[in-house]
Amino acid sequence: MNPKGYRMRILLSCLAGMAMACDSATGPGKEHFELAFTRSEAGELFGDIYVSRADGSHATRLTTGAGAFAPRWSPDGTRIAFVTSLGKYSLIEWISADAADRGGFAQGRNPAWSPDGTQIGFTGSVSIVFPCCSQIPTNVSQIFTVRTDGSNLRQIAPDSAYNTMGSWSPDGKRIAFTRFVPLANAAIFVMAADGSDQVRLTYNPGMSDPVWSPTGAKIAFVGFHDPHYAIYTMNPDGSDQTQVTSGTTDDVCPTWSPDGSRIAFTSNRDGFFQIYLMNADGSNQVRIGSDFSDACPSWKSP
């Protein structure tokens, strides 16, 4: 599977909700919000960050101006990290849950908070000259961490393969991530938080975007089920890999409920990307979206 095509499909799947939505919500007020997500007009590719209740109601916009996507709640629920598209580049920013403050972390994508809230893991780029090919440097995706005050930026697990950030284990000791090995296929690995002790978990083509459950008992991820993508779960050692959505449409961007009993995800089964909820075993799949395009939810910790 061509990595460029794969990354483009995942990008379009996870980011397909990105244009300013035309509702009247202007601020979070005192509402109790649980989901953060990207919302756009259906079919648009630029959007803003919204928050809502777990059933999708009371959707409220936090950012204005489009180009924001991939929101991730901080462990304490006070901030949301997200990505802003800047043409060729992407910037990881944060916004407070009341939309009063906003700042930046680093240039990159795929932000993921450490469980203690002190670090952000993300995907950045480095220039590598591959010995097999020309002497022209190639930009390669790699995994970085940075403290939330912007200090101690460092690349972990330096490697000539393409690596993208997934998520931290609940105890903060391990990171699940995606590696393109060989470059035509995506596989899920886990490693220690410092980049050591890397272990491959999946061997079927096109497995990516791992998300650890809050209990640490399972990892949800996206698998290629030709010609579409489906949601899978597995144990942290790679055993018991189970497909929990049908794969007859593109189902992507899984996120766990705080108790690990449910998964929210994005699907285009109704013609454009919407958010759905299901039990962790794949049962009781219910759409919670609106007439907008809602994508890539993040579930707030209790």
Image: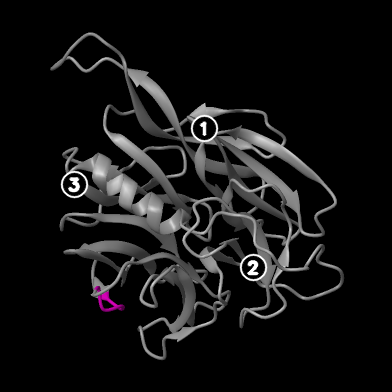
Report the side of 181 relative to 106 (left or right).
Answer: left
- Element at badge 3? loop
Expressed as whole percent of the image width and height from the top left, the position of residue 65 reads 69, 47
The amino acid at mark 2 is Lys
Q: Residue furthest top?
A: 135
Task: Tell me whether circle 3 and circle 2 mark residues in contact (CB < 8 Å).
Answer: no
In which image quadrant can residue 244 be found? bottom left
Crowdedness of circle 3 by 10 Å Cα count: few (<14), some, many (20+)? some
- Element at badge 2? loop
Q: Which label sits in the foreground, 1 or 2?
A: 1
Q: Is residue 266 visible?
A: yes
Expressed as whole percent of the image width and height from the top left, the position of residue 178 reads 33, 47
Q: Earlier in the sequence, mark 3 or mark 2?
A: 3
Residue for badge 2? 300
The amino acid at mark 1 is Gly
In the picture, the disc for residue 185 is 3
The amino acid at mark 3 is Asn
Q: Residue at x 45, y 71 (%)?
A: 265
Whether residue 38 appears in magenta in the rendering, the answer is no
Residue for badge 1? 87
